[in-house]
Amino acid sequence: MTEVSVVLDPGHGGPIDTGAVGRNGLVEKDVNLRLAEATKVILEKRGIATLLTRTADYAVPLRVRVDLADTVNAGILVSIHHNAPTPQASDGPGTEVFVQSDRPDSRRLGSLIYESTVAALLRVPDVQWHAAPDAGVLMVHSTRGGDGYGMISLPEIVSVLAEFAYISSPPEADLLATDLYLEIVSEALADAIEDYLTTDHTGSGFIEEPRIFNPQPSVGAALCEEVDLG
């Protein structure tokens, strides 16, 4: 059996958990899956064994995604998302990569993904980008303490959650619907992952101050939360 180096998690899936929806009708769960599939093809051509947490439009509970990645003992887990709601206009893409607070390797992976994908998106002309004031490579802490997102707090392996662009922003959603977007971002993401696995490069974009945020269960929102069942 081939040892799995990378697990890619296309966020959301199924008829209820669609993720965010753009004004052009683009659905986040579909973009996430297409980007994961395209990235997997590139990585495997480079000899990097890659597994997806879902391969079609069906629901996969958060814990199942995490357990799959941990069970195959992959080197890294990358959860793929596209953001909402739309923040203020920006000169550059508002890509956000959420990282594990207690793992320097997660910070390094997130920084490489951020640097590579932002550079790729900046090469696309005539797009009005949007970004949160603290967009970058971030720790997200809940008010209860610790990492707020389940795809960050639960895995035993190194993990990150990436929000590549704003599907809620019409000009960005129009870009996300194109083959060009899939081509440049899948290549950039694969480059960053290969860089992480084969070099000691550190990337850029890390912000020391954590964001305080409590993800809430919400159909159609770009969340990947661990719900407290009491």
Image (spheres, grey):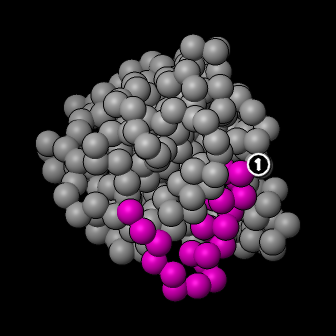
Q: Quadrant of the N terminus?
A: bottom right
User: Magenta stretch?
Assistant: 184-205
Depicted 223 relative to depicted 45: above or below: above
Q: Which residue is at 66% across, 32% downward?
A: 175
Tell me where residue 28 appears, x and y as whole percent: 59, 28
Tell me where residue 61 appears, x and y as whole percent: 52, 36
Direction right: furthest residue: 45
Depicted 212 relative to depicted 45: above or below: above
Relative placement, left or right, of 141 versus 217 is left
Look at label 1 and name its amino acid: Glu
Q: Please tell me which residue lies in front, 152 or 190.
A: 190
Relative placement, left or right, of 195 versus 3 is left
Q: Quadrant of the C terminus?
A: top left
Provide the residue designation for mark 1.
183
Depicted 209 relative to depicted 61: above or below: below
Main secondary structure found in the magenta portion: helix
Q: Please tell me which residue lies in front, 47 or 154.
A: 47
Q: Which residue is at 35% across, 48% downward?
A: 135
Q: Decide whether residue 204 is among the magenta residues.
A: yes
